[in-house]
Image: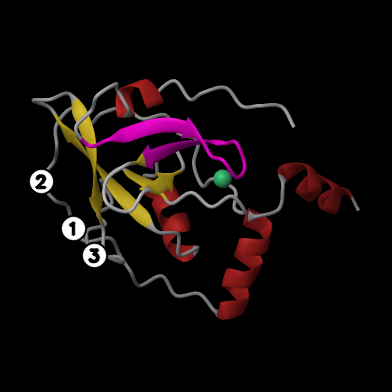
Amino acid sequence: MPREPKPSWLRILCPPGNLAKLEAQRCEGCSRWVVSCRQGVWESWDPGIITGQNLTIAIILQRPLTRIQWIPGLRQAQLEDVSGRYGITPDGQYLSLHDCQLAPISHTPYKPLRQQRKPGKPFPTNIKLTKQEIKTFERIWNTPTSELKQAIKQ
Ligand SMILES: [Zn+2]
């Protein structure tokens, strides 16, 4: 498997000596790039930024999220816990917890928001899907694109 290059925005998210103790590293399990948070319990996050539509996908797939908070004074980012769906707002920027078995939800580069907007309206949590719909969605989501193309051709 070709090794993916280091996502360029990890330099912004994980500058040397940052106070949030964020480190860019390759996952020992799957060798993909992750953002490793070395505070308290070490956690690894997929580096793709989750906003908007991807946020809906992450919620449907029940992937744990953390909110990226940019501290303009320090020009550094820190990660904030979101407990369940609370603390999730449509205009926020998030990372999803890395799982070696699952495809990353997003490959969007990180750009600090110009202005931290005031907390927006809570994210609509009234997405109603049946168990079957979620299963189908998860299956398609976790199928590599090449296999999906095959399936469509058949
Ligand atoms: Zn991994």
Please report whichever mark, 3 or 1, sits nearer to the chain's N-terminal start.
3
* Whole-number angstrom distance, CA of label 1 to CA of label 2: 9 Å
Residue shown at 31%/66% (left/top)?
Answer: 84
- Dot 3 amino acid type: Tyr
Q: Which residue is mark 3?
A: 86
Residue 133 percent location from the top left of the image: 60, 72
Question: Range of the magenta residues?
Answer: 20-36
- Dot 2 amino acid type: Lys
Neighbor class of circle 3 (other Cα within 10 Å; few <14, some 14-19, many 20+) is few
Q: In which quadrant of this rendering is ligand 1 seen?
A: top right
Q: Quadrant of the N terminus?
A: top right
Q: Which residue is mark 2?
A: 118
Looking at this view, is 81 or 120 the one in front? Answer: 81
Vertical side of 140 occupied by 45: above or below: above
Residue 48 appears in the picture as rendered: no
Confirm whether the magenta stretch covers residue 78. Answer: no
- Dot 1 amino acid type: Lys
Vertical side of 37 occupied by 130: above or below: below
Residue shown at 23%/33% (left/top)?
Answer: 77
Q: Which residue is mark 1?
A: 121
Looking at this view, is 151 or 5 the one in front? Answer: 5
Residue 112 percent location from the top left of the image: 25, 29
Please report whichever mark, 3 or 2, sits nearer to the chain's N-terminal start.
3
